Amino acid sequence: MKIKNSAIDSIMLNEACSSGCGSFIDTFSQALGYSISEFSRLGLFAEHPVDLGSRCTVFMNSSVKQAQKDGADIKDISAGLAMSIIKNALYKVIRVSSPEKLGNHIVVQGGTFLNDAILRSFEQETGKQVTRPPIAGLMGAFGAALYARDLAREHSNLLGPAELAAFTHTSKAATCNGCTNHCKLTINLFSGKERYISGNRCDRPLGKEKKAGLPNAYRFKLERLKKYQPAKGAPLGRIGIPMGLNMYENLPFWHTLLSEMGFEVVLSGPTTRKTYTKGQHTIPSDTVCYPAKLMHGHIEQLLEKGVPTIFYPCMTYNFDEHAGDNHYNCPVVAYYPELLKANISDLEHVSFLNPYFSLSDPKKFVKKAGRYFKKKFGVPEKVTKAATEKAYAEYSRYQEDVRSYGKKALEFAEENGYQVIVLAGRPYHIDPEINHGMDQLINSLGLVVVSEDSISYPEEKEKVDVLNQWTYHSRLYAAAKYVTRHSNMQLVQLVSFGCGLDAVTTDEVRRILEDGSRLYTQIKIDEISNLGAARIRLRSLIAAVSL
């Protein structure tokens, strides 16, 4: 937390790190036969600390074992671990470019900093003398107590000695069936009277009034896409489209084009956890983003539906919105059809079509598409041309509907005094299985939700410090700039684990927002659907904005 002008200026939470550094050192010291205080004292006076790098403690065991093989002393290992933890925290988690970025008045807290060796390592690495409160290990509990005191009205809920003596706690797992998310809940019971539910993405399991009336662009876009239904009895038969990645944006175009040419367009269906497990055996790399992994399951769904043809084109370029230096799709979105074709053997039993198309130039597209569909299906080129005109028109209508909804949502927020969250990411982040109900969670906190593409279009091309050549990136930068012009708006960026390109966008979006006196909040998502950390980040943002 950074303090500026006597107020919290920014809050940063771990993106992926699960912390546990203090627990790691405690467990490690016990394994070596030392108490944590003794292990810390040994490290404090080490003369030759082992260089263990700045990796996460999860991967530190192998480095420590190698140091032991090389003859390192226990005190040198203790000091090396302390220095490693500090370097990891500063340069990997907080990502400061230099110690000066931390400021001159630094307060450290947490149980890990009760370790004198770690405290001293921090001072040596930063070159600054820092303040460690006497209750460093209890600061979280102390803050919770202050918060509870401030919330107290006429009566206090604090337990007395007799109630504490009889205090009991039990927990059980449950599944909420209030909607299709089927949240996995943990129900905590305290002394048989009070209960606390976690794991929920909205307020339904809590028995509270659902804030369904608040605008939600993610919900709107999902409902809007349900318009595209198969035309029964189409002369050219059934053709399948896997519903994922760029199809969450390009579906209005491709569905209209294929339907107008005479196909019955069959979609793979809504994404669930089962979609992931269904195609998991054909995923060649676990490092690719979760949205891409889901495409394997969508292909399997289409195969189960018995469609004779699956259409999933490769698209190097996206529509040209003239918002950046170019309009590329990311490599995964652009060429994933090639990977699917090479790794799903059952595609050999159907006609899997993955031609290379670009939608940025209608004249070039209609010529190439005319030749392609005539050769593959005997569709007259004039039919393809007419279908193309309707497809581009439908895509424009879809864009206009999304932008119109965004405008109305902002008007609603302004008229009724609501804060707005721009939940910015990629088109496929509207998939509930991918975003894990993040939009509903934000609504449940009393905030209006709009998407980056619903508000970014009025902005001129944003000047950034990187090559602005990706369509989705351009929207992020423009949306961030738009947020800085409106006092009731904040931006939350959704980032999928495994997205290398977002390593570029996160720094740029942060810079744009902070230059406009806005807070930057990032939430990383993958196949793990525990929203505890996300809820903390969102509530931290709300608390900071309300100060």
Image: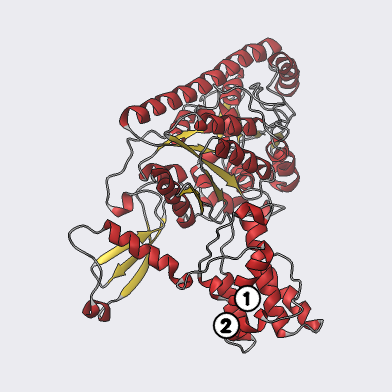
Badge 2 marks a residue whose secondary structure is helix
Q: Nearer the viewer, residue 497 or 447?
A: 447
Q: Quadrant of residue 475?
A: top right
Q: Position of residue 516 (x, y in %)?
A: 54, 35
Q: Nearer the viewer, residue 21 or 222?
A: 21
Q: Residue furthest bottom?
A: 33
Relative vertical location of residue 231 with respect to residue 308 in this rendering, above or below = above
Q: Residue tagged by mark 1?
A: 117
The amino acid at mark 2 is Ile
The amino acid at mark 1 is Ala
Q: Residue tagged by mark 2?
A: 36
Q: Quadrant of residue 316?
A: top right
Q: Nearer the viewer, residue 510 or 122?
A: 122
Q: Does the residue at mark 1 contact the one at mark 2 (Cβ under 8 Å)?
A: no
Q: How is the image coloured?
A: secondary structure
Q: Residues within 10 Å of mark 1 (few under 14, many from 20)?
A: many
Q: Is residue 354 left or right of residue 207?
A: right
Residue 269 in view, yes or no: no
Relative vertical location of residue 80 with respect to residue 430 in this rendering, above or below = below
Relative vertical location of residue 197 with respect to residue 496 in this rendering, above or below = below
CA separation, marks 1 and 2? 11 Å
Q: Quadrant of residue 16?
A: bottom right
Q: Position of residue 71 (x, y in %)?
A: 80, 84
Mark number for residue 451?
Answer: none
Q: Residues within 10 Å of mark 2 (few under 14, many from 20)?
A: some
